[in-house]
Image: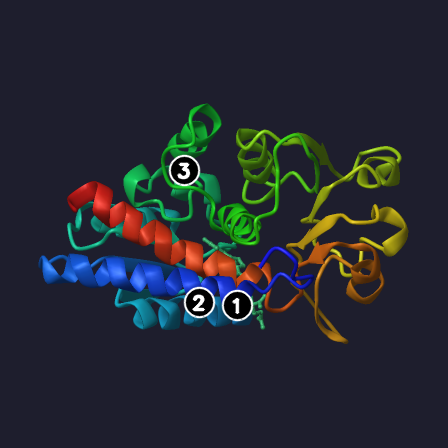
Amino acid sequence: MSQDKILDGRKVAKELETEIGQAVENLTGQGITPGLTVILVGNNPASEIYVSYKEKACNRVGINSNLIKLPAEISEEELLAEVDRLNQDDSVDGILVQLPLPQHIDEEKVINNIRADKDVDGFHPINIGKLMINGSGLHSCTPRGIMEILHRYDIELEGKNAVIIGRSNIVGKPMAQMLLQENATVTVCHSRTKNLKEHTLKADILVAAVGRAKFVTADMVKEGAVVIDVGINRTEDGLLGDVEFEGVKEKAAAITPVPGGVGPMTIATLLKNTLKACQERRG
Ligand SMILES: Nc1nc(=O)c2c([nH]1)NC[C@@H]1CN(c3ccc(C(=O)N[C@@H](CCC(=O)O)C(=O)O)cc3)C=[N+]21
């Protein structure tokens, strides 16, 4: 697939799902069915859509999915009690608390209270620490999904300049670490970076995780670069990535589209993490 220009996240996700489905079937044959429980607080419409994608994906590969819907007014204490109940439930392999949470709840505190070995989002400090040290543990789904795309399209990383725009705990920081682990030379740019274009023009691999529609334009991209678009911006013109796709694709050697690029890989990796959590805890 290495000569393809459009990096097809739906296709790679489907391949991954086939592999996961087989592994789940093996476990189920031994009497163990992996289970994912999603906690959704309130009724943010975007969150409801993402949660429904996750449930459908679980069903496709034979993972038990369970959705716990809680009212927006729930107290932090009650939410933590719910997390604790799932921590202790042996049939629950993965716990995912859909973000964002309402203002009055401390997200960091909730994440810290999920058992690290059930933290299929890879957001717990223990999992982030393991990623930094030796690459073990459960990893954040979006950057892990991006690595899977890069690998399956045989994109070389060793010695390459990888530039990430965005430094979130969920995407930018773990992405930097994963690329570093594979011997790329990594630069992390952010809102305070001076002369952003000077950095991006050196990128062999460019990852855009900014959260602003069409932020990366063709003049910022080196001829022959591999461009990964993490953006999912809902605008009047529909769902747009962080990359100005039409212009940038003329310069790039390969590029992920939105939709159909990174998004489906995030979901597929969540399934993979749930399988891994199950295998490691009770497989
Ligand atoms: N605890 C937690 N874990 C998450 O992983 C998490 C979260 N909270 N909060 C919200 C974000 C967002 N997210 C996406 C997942 C899939 C697509 C996806 O499948 N996108 C498709 C379709 C896009 C569409 O049409 O809506 C695509 O890009 O092709 C997008 C976004 C997971 N998130």
Q: Mark 1 and mark 2 in contact? Answer it, CB < 8 Å.
A: yes
Alpha carbon separation for disc pair 3 and 1: 28 Å
Secondary structure type for disc 3: loop
The mark lying in front, picked from 3 and 1, is 1
Which amino acid, by three-letter code, is at mark 1? Arg
Residue 50 can be seen in this image? yes
Secondary structure type for disc 1: helix
Q: Is residue 168 left or right of residue 86?
A: right
The residue carrying mark 3 is 124
Q: Which mark is residue 92?
A: none
Q: Is 197 drawn above or below residue 234 in the view shown?
A: above
By what rule are the colours in the image chosen?
rainbow
The residue carrying mark 2 is 14
Q: Which sits earlier in the primary sequence, circle 2 or circle 3?
A: 2
Q: Is residue 34 left or right of residue 57?
A: left
Determine if the C-beta at disc 1 is less than 8 A from ligand 1. Answer: yes
**Residue at point 74% right, 41% down?**
204
The mark lying in front, picked from 2 and 3, is 2
- Residue 70 screen position, x and y as percent: 36, 64
Alpha carbon separation for disc pair 2 and 3: 28 Å
- Residue 71 screen position, x and y as percent: 39, 65
Residue 40 can be seen in this image? no
Q: Residues within 10 Å of mark 2 (few under 14, many from 20)?
A: some
The residue carrying mark 1 is 10
The image quarter containing residue 168 is top right
- Residue 259 screen position, x and y as percent: 62, 69
- Residue 137 screen position, x and y as percent: 36, 36
Which amino acid, by three-letter code, is at mark 3? His
Q: Residue furthest bottom?
A: 237
Which amino acid, by three-letter code, is at mark 2? Lys
